[in-house]
Amino acid sequence: MKKPTYKGKELLPLSVIDAARDGDSQAVDQVLRYYEGYINKLCTRTLYDSDGQPHVRVDEYMKRRLEIKLIHSIVSMS
């Protein structure tokens, strides 16, 4: 059977979401890895050095906050 996809990306199995909701740490980690690219895109910032040169970086503080919010949302779905 072909696995379901959305815009060419394989969807996260419902069993993984259920396991994460029940507190399985490996399942939570799998959910975080699934959304890592999207979170990185949301947290990308352009910073400028003292010479005015732009540097594109992922804001690690914002990334951790979004990951915590995602984990909190998963666990509180019960």
Image: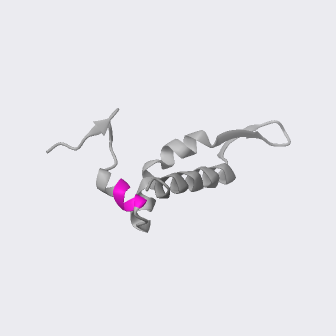
Quarter of the image that includes the C terminus: bottom left
Answer with the quarter of the image where residue 39 lies. top right
* Residue shown at 34% from the left, 48% from the top: 12
* Residue shown at 33% from the left, 44% from the top: 11
Determine the main secondary structure of the stretch shown in magenta.
Answer: helix
Residue 29 is one of the magenta-drawn residues: no
Q: Position of residue 43 (x, y in %)?
A: 62, 43
- Residue 54 or residue 7, whichever sits in front: 7
Q: Position of residue 47 (x, y in %)?
A: 75, 41
25 w.r.t. 4: above or below:
below
- Residue 16 or residue 2, whichever sits in front: 16
- How many numbered circles are shown? 0
Q: Position of residue 60 (x, y in %)?
A: 65, 53
- Residue 23 or residue 65, whichever sits in front: 23
Q: Give the farthest residue toward the right.
A: 50
Residue 18 is one of the magenta-drawn residues: yes
51 w.r.t. 68: above or below:
above
* Residue shown at 40% from the left, 67% from the top: 24
- Residue 78 or residue 48, whichever sits in front: 78
Answer with the quarter of the image where residue 26 lies. bottom left
In this picture, residue 4 sits left or right of residue 39: left
7 w.r.t. 66: above or below:
above
Quarter of the image that includes the N terminus: top left
Q: Give the farthest residue toward the front.
A: 78
In this picture, residue 3 sits left or right of residue 37: left
* Residue shown at 22% from the left, 44% from the top: 3
Q: Give the farthest residue toward the top.
A: 7
Colour scheme of the picture:
one colour
| Stretch in magenta | 17-21
